Amino acid sequence: MDMTSGGIIRLHPSDNVVIALADLRGGASAEGLTLSGPVPRGHKIAVCPIAKGHAVLRYGQIIGQATVDIDAGAHVHSHNLGMGPHTLDYAHGTEARALPALDPRNFMGFHRADGQVGTRNYLGILTSVNCSGSVARFIAEAAEKDPVIANMPGLDGVVPIVHATGCGMSGSNEGYETLMRTLKGYARNANFGGILLVGLGCEVMQVPDLVGQGRLRPDGNFRYMTIQATGGTRATIEAGLRVLREMAEVAGRTQRAPAPVSKLIVGLQCGGSDGYSGITANPALGHASDLLVQMGGTTILSETPEIYGAEHLLTRRAVSPAVGERLIERIRWWEDYTARNGGEMDNNPSPGNKKGGLTTILEKSLGAVAKGGTAPLTAVYKFAEPITTPGFVYMDSPGYDPCSVTGQIASGATTIVFTTGRGSVSGYKPSPCIKLATNTEMYDRMSEDMDVNCGDILSSGVSIRDKGTQILDKIIATASGEPTLSETLGFGGAEFVPWQIGAVM
């Protein structure tokens, strides 16, 4: 990055746009440019004339094509920039370079019977269908008042995992398989010390099918029941409470103990992105991701519609052509999925993204991919598939944040790190969520929600490397039990959002 003194920043020598670091008025001068109109902070300014149909470059990469002739000094945004054709050279594996190993660090975690290590120790009430969601919440509310459960040392609480699906769906298609993986993944997540599965009894997602596909928890701290077989609402609440008392006794015996960070699985997320996301928080998180990988840990990049146009940066880092091709297979699936549902891949940038300075999905994706650092891409997974390969990996998901995080947790993520420029507020029990602010103005305005300010990379000249190290320190402290601000505020009870694929019948 090349900082200038005129309130703008050039991100790459070949770029034909620069980024405003403050709201600039029309007629103002910046780096020898006279602005033809006002430009909000985070937005783009043409540094030279750009002819209609010619490429617009940011980060040294194409972010779209000019839809009209653009003069030097003009604001470049949705009114004069479009996506253009999407053709890329994937060059699988040509830039995969192993990073040097670093001495491992430790965190204090909960060791599980299958070798995983959790960062939290919750009991979960998992539901097979929306029809059992209220009863699951009633059981959790009763558990909060129960002296045995509420006062159990080392237990972080009881989490009802409720959702909007599980019935009115095919019992054999891709949507059913995805939900099955998601529920099984939550049951096995290392942040749960025990799981009670509650169904209604007559739903498509049958409890016996979930239970019968293999042991859901190697520690055996797992129970299940259906409301219809147990005798109705009140009987199920009473039975569930008795079961949770027994499970709390087992989960409470597990105490925090040292574990290497190689046992950490961290989901990398962004939401409410702005023009600073790809300049500050995302590359800083990318450096923290690299540090974790260098210590043997695992990081998960996701949100396939938000890497579209930048997937070539990942395929070039793939450890093999097969890994790169698996990512492209997911891209092709998404192109078909959006087309048959009347959408297109460039629909992803939200009104808030655009207000913050992002125009096309290509521009948004180039910034989003920065969260993945520079480590080789070791594996690509479908939504909620168990992560079995360490290092930097990819899990396919929608760009909708709660749904994407749901898949990462089902795949095994025990900590989430979430960058935001507009100010997303959310939490994702059972995994703690660390919020990174991309700009200081938003951080100051929403400091009760933001754990780390990355805006000082621009406002105070903090380096990407130093900020990445700070983020790693925060990840380790959080994994060891330090609460995040979203946990303190009580988030996490409404953000379980399984990916619903297929017809609702």
Image: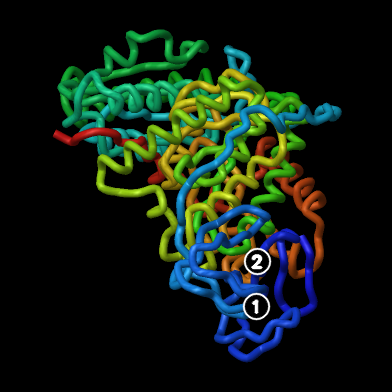
User: What's the residue type where badge 1 is placed?
Assistant: Ala
Q: Quadrant of residue 269?
A: top right
Report how many numbered discs are placed on residues in the image. 2
Q: In the displayed structure, does residue 76 sit left or right of residue 437?
A: left
- Colour theme: rainbow
Q: Which residue is mark 1?
A: 22
Residue at image position (46%, 50%) is: 85
**Disc 2 on helix, strand or loop?**
loop
Q: Which residue is mark 2?
A: 16
Q: In the displayed structure, does residue 239 sit left or right of residue 84?
A: left
Of the pair 259 and 61, the residue shown nearer to us: 61
Query: Residue 467 placed where, x, y %?
Result: 77, 52
Residue at image position (73%, 24%) is: 259
**Disc 1 on helix, strand or loop?**
loop
Rendered-image quadrant of the N terminus: bottom right
Of the pair 188 and 403, the residue shown nearer to us: 403
Residue at image position (58%, 70%) is: 50
Of the pair 424 and 237, the residue shown nearer to us: 424
452 to 330, vertically: above or below:
below
Label annotation for residue 283: none
User: What's the residue type where badge 2 is placed?
Assistant: Asn
Query: Residue 256 placed where, x, y %?
Result: 68, 27
47 to 138, vertically: above or below:
below
Residue 347 seen anywhere in this rendered image of the structure: yes
**What is the CA distance from the residue labelled 2 to the residue labelled 1?**
19 Å
10 to 367, vertically: above or below:
below
Rendered-image quadrant of the C terminus: top left
Query: Residue 501 placed where, x, y %?
Result: 29, 34
